[in-house]
């Protein structure tokens, strides 16, 4: 999970992950982690990870990781992680920096409200 997170920060968000710690003095510890193991993976299996942002708060954010086999519907593991931005100097939470927040917003999953509104529109169209 950490490798997926680091790659996401570097590649997708365009944020220097090491610089976040070393220069900006911001850590992002995981404060809650839930895993659902749905199917086994075997030695030699090729798997893929996807990541979506479920929620962005003031200083915390919730991510959903999904590990699949070669077919997207072959879900092996679902992970829910809540992370918080914190100062490495005083170990207190700090607001998510604006550049990171804006970059994360591109990866937000549709909210339940927007899914429900979409379903209502589909029903009305029938």
Image: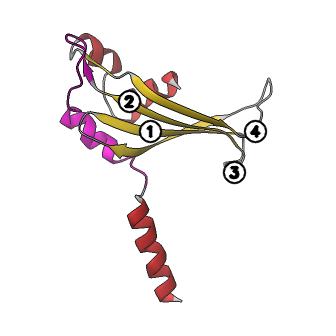
Q: Quadrant of residue 96?
A: top left
Checking the image for residue 83, the label placed there is: 2
* Residue 18 horizontal/vertical position (percent): 33, 15
Q: Nearer the viewer, mark 3 or mark 4?
A: 4
Of the 4 image quadrants, the one containing the C terminus is bottom right
Residue receiving disc 4: 39
Direction from residue 24 to residue 27 in the image, left or right: right
The Cα atoms of the two marked residues, 2 and 4, are separated by 26 Å
Q: Nearer the viewer, mark 3 or mark 1?
A: 1
* Residue 85 horizontal/vertical position (percent): 28, 26
* Residue 11 horizontal/vertical position (percent): 40, 31
Q: For mark 3, give the secondary structure.
A: loop
Q: Which circle's residue, 2 or 4, is located before the other in the chain?
A: 4
Q: Residue at x 39, y 66 (%)?
A: 114
Q: For mark 1, give the secondary structure.
A: strand
Residue receiving disc 3: 73
Mark 1, Cα crowd under 10 Å, few <14 / some 14-19 / many 20+, is many
Q: Which circle's residue, 3 or 4, is located before the other in the chain?
A: 4
Is the Cβ of the residue at disc 1 closer than 8 Å to that at disc 2? yes
Mark 2, Cα crowd under 10 Å, few <14 / some 14-19 / many 20+, is some
Q: Which circle's residue, 1 or 2, is located before the other in the chain?
A: 1
* Residue 106 horizontal/vertical position (percent): 35, 48
The Cα atoms of the two marked residues, 3 and 1, are separated by 19 Å
Q: Is residue 110 above or below residue 88?
A: below
User: Camera-side residue: 76 or 18?
Assistant: 76
The Cα atoms of the two marked residues, 2 and 3, are separated by 27 Å
Q: Which residues are magenta?
A: 86-109
Mark 4, Cα crowd under 10 Å, few <14 / some 14-19 / many 20+, is few
């Amino acid at each position: 999970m950490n490798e997926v997170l680091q790659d996401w920060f570097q590649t997708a968000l365009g944020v220097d992950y090491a610089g976040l710690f070393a220069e900006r003095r911001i850590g992002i510890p995981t404060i809650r982690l839930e895993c659902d193991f749905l199917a086994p993976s075997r030695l030699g299996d090729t798997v893929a990870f996807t990541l979506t942002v479920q929620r962005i708060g003031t200083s915390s954010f919730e991510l959903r990781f999904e590990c699949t086999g070669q077919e997207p519907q072959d879900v092996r593991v679902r992970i829910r992680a809540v992370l918080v931005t914190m100062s490495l100097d005083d170990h207190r939470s700090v607001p998510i920096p604006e550049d990171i927040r804006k970059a994360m917003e591109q990866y937000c999953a549709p909210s339940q409200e927007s899914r429900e509104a979409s379903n209502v529109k589909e029903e009305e169209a029938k």
